[in-house]
Image (cartoon, helix red, strand yellow):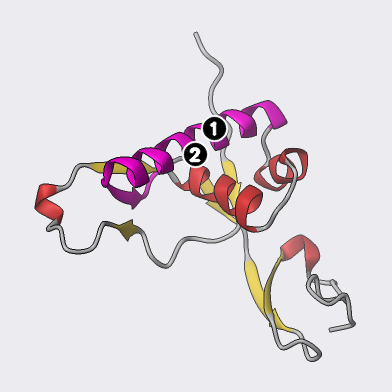
Amino acid sequence: MPRPKCCRQVGCMPDKNYFKPRGIPSSQLQEVVLSLDEYEAVRLADFEGLYQEQAALQMNISRQTFGRIIAEAHRKIADVLINGKALKIKGGDVAVKKTTFLTCRNCRREFAVNQEQQNMKTCPHCQMPV
């Protein structure tokens, strides 16, 4: 009997959850479903540029589990791009962290801050005080 899955932490829900090739009706496309934990793994590793160990800590999972999740997400995204399929983001056993957005007074860039980082005093982009 396998171990039960622990609830994975995600930083935010995607505001767009469906992507498809332009000019092809959705009814003619195969769909690939990317779970919310796979979406979060891609966001942390590829968009935020975190190492697997750091990203795994943020998701409240082991580094090995993170590696399996990101590998599966990359496989699905490659399938969508190479074979011209639609990508739908949904599902999974996840909990959303409470996130607020701050704007840096110096570089004017917006960045997310979760509950544990509420006392954050420097911008992650320019390293200047917020």
Q: Nearer the viewer, residue 74 or 17?
A: 74
- If the image is split into quadrants, where does the C terminus sit? bottom right
Residue 31 is left or right of residue 16, and the answer is left
Residue 99 position in % (x across, y down): 63, 67
Residue 71 is tagged as 1
Label 1 CA crowd tier, 10 Å (few <14, some 14–19, many 20+): some
| Mark 1–mark 2 CB contact (< 8 Å) | yes
Residue at horizontal 76%, vertical 85%?
A: 104
> Which residues make up the magenta segment?
62-91
Residue at horizontal 53%, vertical 23%?
A: 4
* Prevailing secondary structure class for the magenta stretch in the rendered image: helix
Q: Nearer the viewer, residue 93 or 68?
A: 68
Circle 2: residue type: His
Of helix, strand and loop, which one carries label 1?
helix
Label 2 CA crowd tier, 10 Å (few <14, some 14–19, many 20+): some
Residue 74 is tagged as 2
